[in-house]
Image (cartoon, rainbow, N blue to C red):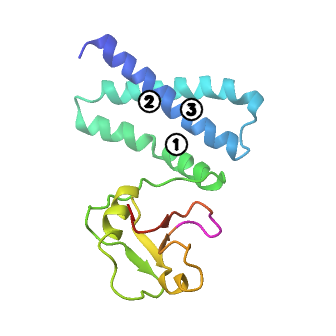
Amino acid sequence: MSNNQNLGIRIGAAGHFASRMIAAAVASGQVTYADASKAFADLTADCFETLNTIEDSYSTPAATQAAVAGNTAAVQELHAMTQNSGNTIVAPAPTVVAGSMPQVVGEQHGELPAWLGPICAKYGITKVFDNRPGLVDKPTRPHFRQAGLPAGSRDAKGLWPDTK
């Protein structure tokens, strides 16, 4: 990799890190929108300097560890900012193996049908509620409903057998 490419990668990484930290700081009220540009420029420069220090010391493992350890406080501060900002941190969807069955939350009413595993795998659903007993009174209800979402979420997916 050429020095120009390496420099470009460090500049991009510094900007990325700074943008994430400034977004968390603005969301938590630690930085106002009016001050965000200046804070972003200053933080980008600081991140770039840190990346340069790490890059320059890369040939010496002890120096690299010291450079990373010296920035532990900044990493802990960023973590604290994102935890207190009120932002929702979205975890990546779990990998669901096709053919595996989801976990039933609450009471399970009989064996799970074969069609449920592939549909849950398609949408990355790992937990469901079993609604089959209510189908007698309300036949248009979904047979299963996605579980594991935040309380009150209206994003839960309903699951019906494919009748086509």
Seen in the image, is 72 located left or right of residue 19?
Answer: left
Earlier residue among tags 3 and 1: 3
Q: Amino acid at mark 3?
A: Ser
Q: On screen, 8 above or below 16?
A: above
Is residue 151 rendered magenta in the image?
yes
* Mark 3 in CB contact with mark 2 (< 8 angstroms): no
Look at the magenta stretch and give its main secondary structure: loop
> Where residue 7 sits: x, y (%)?
37, 16
The C terminus is located in which quarter?
bottom left
Residue at (34%, 79%) from the top-left corner?
A: 112
Q: Which residue is mark 1?
A: 74
| Disc 2 element | helix
Tally of marks: 3
Q: Which residue is mark 3?
A: 19
Residue 50 image label: 2
| Residue range highlighted in magenta | 149-153
| Disc 3 element | helix
Q: Nearer the viewer, mark 3 or mark 2?
A: 3
* Mark 1 in CB contact with mark 2 (< 8 angstroms): yes
For label 2, count other residues whose C-alpha is less than 10 Å away and answer few (under 14), some (14-19) or many (20+): some
Residue at (55%, 64%) from the top-left corner?
A: 156
Residue at (32%, 26%) from the top-left corner?
A: 55
Q: Amino acid at mark 1?
A: Ala
* Mark 3 in CB contact with mark 1 (< 8 angstroms): no
Seen in the image, is 91 located left or right of residue 150?
Answer: left
